[in-house]
Image (spheres, rainbow, N blue to C red):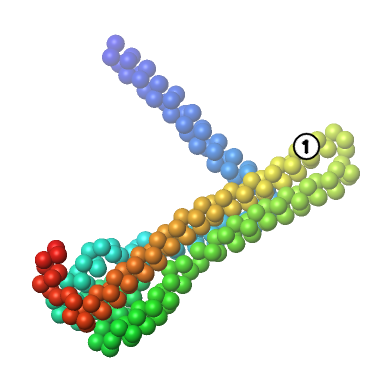
Amino acid sequence: MSASMMVHHLLDVVLTAEPAHAAEGSFKDSLVAFFKEGGTFMFVNIFWLACALAVTVERVVTLMFRYNLNAGPFMEQITKLVLTGNPDRAVKLCGAAPNAPLAKVVRAGLTRANRGEVEVAKAIEESILEQTPHISARIQWLWSLANIATLFGLIGTIIGLIGTFKSLGNVPADQKQALLSKGISEAMNNTAFGLGIAVTCIIAHLFLTAYARRMIEVVELNAMKLENLLARRAAGETSAMDFEKAS
């Protein structure tokens, strides 16, 4: 009795697994057919999709990993070192994050700390102007790639329809419906693929633009805090004791 139940259980597993496998194969076949039916311009848009993905991945890795720096704890350590009279150690702390824009801006201000408020302000402003383009670099490409992918999709659509209507006059009447169906599939596949790439690019552009803008705002805010801190310290308004009481 138990053996019969095991056989039935195995049959149930096989029967339930077959549709999943068939669905996976069906999806792959549909995807391959989608690109084949789209014609040459589908492969052209694959190139633009690869470009968009490359830009997105590069920006995500750069902004979220290479440039990422927890501003709160970092500036707290910088403040402690400055107020305790250890600006050299603060400069070395900035060197621990050599790629982070915030660390570079803070380092620029600290290295001019003994040259007066004007020199500190100039150094910080110059460093911000230097780092800002690096933060927002190549993000605008995504908007252009969205437009390019859309246009290439439309070109593929138009060319597919032109080729189809040209061919209709050279085939028997019983083949015209199949040829027309094939041409419309090619046209619509190009349009759908181009629009899909465009939507992907626009979403990535919105996300990366917001992230980069936020990073620039954090850099500018903490640069201003550092400038004020150095100015107050030079005027004798702050000390390590004051900082310990405040904390």
50 sits to left or right of 151:
left
Crowding around mark 1 (Cα neighbors within 10 Å: few <14, some 14 to 19, many 20+) is: few
The foreground one among 217 and 163 is 217
Q: Which residue is mark 1?
A: 178
Q: Is residue 138 visible?
A: yes
Q: Residue at x 76, y 51 (%)?
A: 158
Closer-to-camera residue (158/170): 158
- 34 lies left or right of 60: right
Q: Quadrant of residue 121?
A: bottom left
Where is residue 152 drawn, in percent x and y? Answer: 68, 56
- In depth, the one of 34 and 21 nearer the eye is 34
Q: Residue at x 19, y 69 (%)?
A: 77
Q: Residue at x 29, y 11 (%)?
A: 1
Q: Secondary structure at mark 1?
A: helix
Which image quadrant for residue 178?
top right
Foreground residue, 127 or 11?
A: 127
Q: Where the C terminus falls, by quadrant?
A: bottom left
Q: Position of residue 60 (x, y in %)?
A: 42, 60
Residue 217 position, x and y percent, is 39, 65
